[in-house]
Amino acid sequence: MPGETFLVKPFLMEDHSEALKIWADHGIRGSLVIHVDAHPDFSEEGLDEQVLDKAQSLSPSPILWESLQADLKGAWFGIHCGNYLAVAMKMGMIARCVWVLPKGLFPDFSFQAVLSQLSLWVDVPLEDLNRFALKEGRWEGSLWGIPLILCDSEHLPEISAPYLLDIDVDYFIGEDSRIWTPPSEVLSRLCGNKGPEILTIAYSVSGGYTPLEHRFIGDLLLEHVLSPSPPLDRAESLIIKGDGARAEGRLKEARALYEEAARTGKFLPAALYKAGLAFTSEEEPEKAREAFEKSEELDPRFRPDPLDEALVRYRLKDFDNALHWFEKAETPTTGKVCYLMKALIAEEKREWREALELFSKIVVEDPREKTALLLMKARISEENGALAFAQDCYEQACALQPLSPAAHWGLGRCLSARFRAPEGIPLLRKALRLAKPTLQSLAIRTSLSRAYRDAGMTALAQGEERRVLE
C-alpha cells in the first residue's frame, strides 16, 4: 500500500481550488502535477489579467486568497475549481501536467475526441495544436507551451519524484453515478514506489460534481495513504458491491452488504446513507429517514444540501428532479445560481424563451458578469432566429467590454445574418484582431469568410478559407 512506501504531505479539501493555495504555501515552482480528475480544471473561464496579476501575490495572505476566490453564488470572476490548474500553470508552479482521465471518458481516443473534450474547457492555442502525438497509448503535447499529457491510469508516463498528485473524487464516479473502479487500486498505481511530494484530494460534493453518497472516497484515499489495513480494503470492496446490487435492483442484498461494510468499523456514515438510499428505492420512507438521520448524526457532512443535490441531478441530466431541488434551494443567497441553472435547463429542453426570461432575473453589477450574461442571452437568441434581440445584446456587450472578441464576433455574425454583411465585416475583422491565435480565431475567420462571400468579395473569402486550412 502507498502508506508503506513513501512519506507524503496529504491534504483533503472540499473545493478543488484549495490545492492552488496549498501549493503556493509550500513554495511550489516548476513541478510536475499528476491530475486525476473527470475534468481538466485548466479552463480560463473566470480568469482575466486582473485576477492573474493578483494571483502572483497569492501566498501567504489568506485575505488575498478569499478575495480571489469565485463561486456560483457570488463572484463569477476569480479562481475556482474549474480553473485553478490554469492559474498554477500560468504562474509557473506547474511546468508539466499529466491529466489522468477516467477510462471510457472518450468513445475512442482519437485526436478529434481529445480536442473536442479539451475545447469544452479551454480555447486551445493554435501553436499547441500541432504538437500533440499519440505515444504508447498517451496523447502528448502542450498547452500554453507547457508539456501536457492525456492518458488513463494504465498508460502513465515514467514519473520521477518529486511530483504533485492531485485527485478529484469525481474521477471515480461513472455516468451512471456508480464507482467504476476501486479507488485504492488506482491510488497504488499512481503512487508506485516513489510517491508524491504533496497529495491533494478534493471531495467536490459542493458544486454537485460528486454525489453525497460517494464523499467517503476522499476519506478512503487519505486512510489508504496514512494507515492502510485489511478492514479498509474489505469496507471498500463491500460498499462497491452494495452499490452494484442496488443499481441492479437487488435492494435487500445491497443493504446486507452495506451492513457488513459498517461492521468493519470503516465509513459507517456512508454505509448508513447508502442503506437509506436502498430503503428509498424499496419505498420504505420511515426506514430510509432513520438511516439518513443516523448517518447525519455520525457525520453532519452527510446532510444533503439542496443546491448540491440540484447540481448533481443537473450534471446527470435528470432535469425534472434538478428543477425540483433548485426550487428547494432558492434563497436570497442562492437565487443567482438557481436562476442561471434553471435557464440552462430550459435551454437544454429547447424552451429558449423561458431561458431568456430566467436569465433576465439574474442581477449582477460587475461589467464582466453583465457581459457574460448578455453573451449567453445573445447566443440563445441567435441560435433560435431572434436576430434583432441577439444584435441588441451583442451591442450592449461591445459597449461594456470594448476589447471582447466574442462580443464583436457575435455582433458581426448577427449583422451578416441579417443581410448586412458590409456592416458586419469590420466587426469580424476587429474580433480577429482582438482574439488570440486560438481555435476561436479559426471560427472567427470562418465567419469572416462567409461574410465576404455574402458581400460578393469572393477573393477575400477564399483567402480566409486558405488561412483556416493552414
Image (tube, helix red, strand yellow):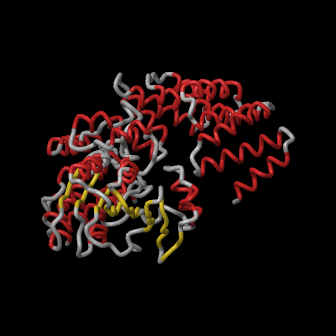
Q: Quadrant of the N terminus?
A: bottom left
From the viewer's side, name the closer residue of 338 and 445. 445
Q: Quadrant of the C terminus?
A: bottom right
Residue 333 drawn at (x, y percent): 34, 25
Vertical position of residue 333 compared to residue 451: above or below: above
Which residue appears at 32% of the width and 72% of the height?
Answer: 159
Residue 238 drawn at (x, y percent): 25, 64
Q: Which image quadrant is residue 188 in? A: bottom left
From the viewer's side, name the closer residue of 134 and 213. 134
| Image-based side of 299 in relation to 254, left or right | left
Residue 66 drawn at (x, y percent): 27, 35
- Numbered-mark total: 0
The residue most toward the bottom is 136
From the viewer's side, name the closer residue of 157 and 286. 157
| Image-based side of 149 in relation to 421, left or right | left
Residue 139 drawn at (x, y percent): 49, 68
Q: Which image quadrant is residue 245 in? A: bottom left
Q: Is residue 256 visible?
A: no
| Image-based side of 293 in relation to 346, left or right | left
From the viewer's side, name the closer residue of 464 and 306. 464
| Image-based side of 280 in relation to 369, left or right | left
Q: Is residue 47 visible?
A: yes
Vertical position of residue 167 compared to residue 299: above or below: below
